[in-house]
Image: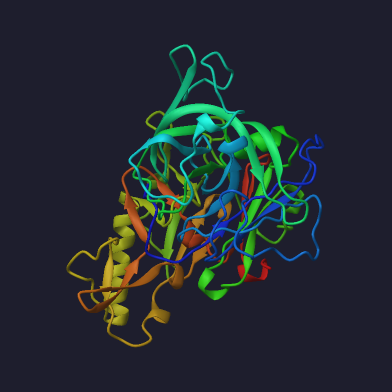
C-alpha cells in the first residue's frame, strides 16, 4: 500500500465527545466534522485560531468539534492525549487498516517534524503501560519483559513500533468545554518510519474492527459505532465549509444507495469488499476477471479493501496492467494523447497534454462489485495535472500493487459511503458532498 501523498490540498477531521461520556445506552449517534482550514492548533487548549462551528441545530447527542489542518488526502482528528502537564492536543491521521490508535512518544526516531511536542509519558500522571498479563496483550501484540506489551507493524500510514499504554483522551467542545475519557488503550510509538505526515500529524487513529481500535473502544463506553458514514468533498471547492464523519443514529438514510457485502468478517479486521470487474468508459474490460481480485486467506494475499488512510487507489498488478494498457490505448486512439516516455515524480502513468480542454474528455472507470453494485469514478478523480520539464501532464491516480487492491481516499470524493459493521454491508451512492457541510 502507498504512503501519504503530498501532491494535493488539505482535508481534515476533528473530534469532540458527546455531553454524557458515561452513558451506557449504546445508541448515541455522533459526527466528526471534515473541514479545510489553515488555522493553527493550540496544543494546550485544543483550540484552532478563532474558527468555531455554528451553534445552530446542535444535537446534544452529536459531536461538534473544532477544526485542524492536514495534507490532502490525509484525514485527521484532533484529540488531547495525556493528563496534567503531559496533556497536549494532537492531529491523528484517520486509519481503517491499523489495529491500534498510536502516537509518537519520547524518545522517537527518526526525529520528523510534527505540530506540537512529541508526547512525553513521564509528564502524564495517569499514563500506564499495559502489562504482558493484560487481556489486551494478545497477538498481534507481544509481551516484553515483565512490565510491557510491545506492538509493531506496517499500515498504509507508517512502519511503527513501541509499547501499549493507557491514558486520558480529551475532546474539545465548542459549547461546554473539554470532556475526557480515561483508560483508553493506545500505542506509544518510539519508532515511526516512512511516516509522511506533512510535518503536521503526530500519529494515527484506528477505525477498524479490532478490540483495540478507537471505534471499538468508544462502543465499549456506550457510543453506537455499529455503522459510520462519510461523504468527502474536494476542499478547493468549499474552502470555508466542513463535512462530517457520522456514526450510529447520526448516519443519513441510505435506502437509495447501492450495497455490497463486507467480506471475510471472521478472519480479518479490515473492510473487504468483492471486486469482480472493471469497465473503462462504460465498456467492460473482459480480460479482467473476478479471480484476479480473490483473497488467499492462508497467504494473506489479494482481495479488495476500502481505506481512507490510503491516498490513491491501488490495484493488484495482474488487473492493473490490463487497465493501464486500455487507458493508454483509449487516450492515444480517441484523443491523440501520448504516454510520457519518462517517469514523472510521484506518478506511475502520465500523458503529455497540449490540447486545450482535453481533461473533460478523459475516461471514467466503473468498478463492478459483488451483488451487482457498480461504483463509477469520474475522470476528475482519476487524473491530476502535473508540470514536469516545462510540460503539462495528466497523471493517472490508480497505481499497481503486488499484494492487494485498495479503494483509496482520492477516488471516494463526492460519493457517500456507509460501513454497516453489524450487517456486514457497504452502502454507497453519488452525492454532492458539499451539501453535507456547514
* Residue nearest the viewer, comparing 110 with 381: 110
Q: Is 273 located above or below residue 5 in the figure?
A: above
Residue under the image location 54 percent in, 75 percent down: 237
Residue 247 visible in the shown view: yes
Residue under the image location 45 percent in, 72 percent down: 380
Q: Is 135 located above or below residue 330 in the figure?
A: above
User: Is 156 placed left or right of 173 in the picture?
Assistant: left
Percent across and percent down for residue 94 are: 53, 48
User: Is 46 placed left or right of 175 in the picture?
Assistant: left
Residue 83 visible in the shown view: no
Q: Kindly indicate the quadrant of the structure image that contains residue 321.
A: bottom left
Residue under the image location 70 percent in, 32 percent down: 220
User: Is 255 placed left or right of 345 in the picture?
Assistant: right
Q: Is 265 located above or below residue 200 in the figure?
A: above
Q: How many marks?
A: 0
Which residue ends up furthest to the front in the rendered image? 85
* Residue nearest the viewer, comparing 153 with 67: 67
Percent across and percent down for residue 128 are: 57, 24
Percent across and percent down for residue 154 are: 39, 37
Q: Kindly indicate the quadrant of the structure image that contains residue 86.
A: top right
Percent across and percent down for residue 6 are: 37, 60
* Residue nearest the viewer, comparing 142 with 340: 142
Q: Quadrant of the C terminus?
A: bottom right
Amino acid at each position: 500500500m502507498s504512503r501519504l501523498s503530498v501532491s494535493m490540498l488539505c482535508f481534515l477531521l476533528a473530534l469532540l465527545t458527546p455531553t454524557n461520556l458515561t452513558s451506557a445506552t449504546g445508541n448515541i449517534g455522533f459526527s466528526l466534522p471534515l473541514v479545510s482550514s489553515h488555522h493553527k492548533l493550540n496544543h494546550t487548549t485544543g483550540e484552532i485560531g478563532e474558527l468555531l462551528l455554528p451553534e445552530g441545530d446542535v444535537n446534544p447527542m452529536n459531536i461538534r468539534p473544532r477544526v485542524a489542518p492536514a495534507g490532502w488526502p490525509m484525514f485527521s482528528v484532533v484529540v488531547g492525549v495525556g493528563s496534567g502537564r503531559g496533556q497536549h492536543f494532537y492531529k491523528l491521521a484517520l486509519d481503517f487498516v491499523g489495529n491500534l490508535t498510536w502516537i509518537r512518544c519520547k524518545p522517537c526516531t527518526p526525529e520528523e517534524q510534527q505540530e506540537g511536542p512529541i508526547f512525553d509519558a513521564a509528564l502524564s500522571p495517569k499514563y500506564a503501560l499495559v502489562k504482558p498479563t493484560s487481556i489486551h496483550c494478545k497477538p498481534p501484540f507481544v509481551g516484553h519483559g515483565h512490565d510491557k506489551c510491545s506492538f509493531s507493524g506496517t499500515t498504509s500510514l507508517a512502519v511503527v513500533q513501541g509499547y501499549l499504554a493507557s491514558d486520558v483522551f480529551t475532546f474539545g467542545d465548542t459549547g461546554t468545554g473539554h470532556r475526557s475519557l480515561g483508560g483508553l488503550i493506545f500505542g506509544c510509538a518510539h519508532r515511526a518510519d516512512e511516516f509522511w505526515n506533512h510535518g503536521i500529524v503526530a500519529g494515527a487513529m484506528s477505525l477498524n474492527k479490532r478490540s483495540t481500535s478507537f471505534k471499538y473502544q468508544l462502543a465499549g463506553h456506550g457510543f453506537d459505532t455499529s455503522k459510520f458514514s462519510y461523504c468527502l468533498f474536494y476542499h478547493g471547492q468549499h474552502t470555508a465549509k466542513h463535512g462530517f464523519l457520522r456514526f450510529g443514529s447520526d448516519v443519513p438514510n441510505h435506502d437509495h444507495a447501492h450495497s455490497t457485502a463486507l467480506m471475510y468478517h471472521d478472519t480479518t479486521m479490515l473492510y473487504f469488499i468483492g471486486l469482480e470487474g472493471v469497465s473503462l468508459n462504460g465498456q467492460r474490460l473482459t480480460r479482467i476477471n473476478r479471480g484476479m481480485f480473490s483473497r488467499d486467506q492462508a497467504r494473506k494475499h489479494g482481495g479488495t479493501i476500502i481505506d481512507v488512510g490510503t491516498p490513491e487507489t491501488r490495484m493488484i498488478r495482474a488487473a492493473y496492467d490490463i487497465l493501464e494498457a486500455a487507458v493508454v490505448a483509449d487516450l492515444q486512439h480517441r484523443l491523440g494523447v501520448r504516454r510520457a516516455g519518462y517517469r514523472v515524480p510521484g506518478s506511475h502513468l502520465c500523458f503529455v497534454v497540449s490540447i486545450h480542454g482535453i481533461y473533460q474528455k478523459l475516461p471514467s472507470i466503473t468498478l463492478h462489485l459483488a451483488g451487482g453494485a457498480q461504483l463509477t469514478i469520474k475522470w476528475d478523480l482519476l487524473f491530476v495535472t502535473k508540470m514536469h520539464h516545462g510540460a503539462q501532464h495528466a497523471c493517472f491516480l490508480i497505481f499497481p500493487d503486488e499484494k492487494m487492491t485498495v479503494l483509496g481516499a482520492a477516488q471516494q470524493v463526492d460519493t457517500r459511503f456507509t460501513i454497516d459493521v453489524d450487517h456486514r454491508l457497504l452502502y454507497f451512492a453519488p452525492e454532492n458532498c458539499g451539501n453535507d457541510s456547514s
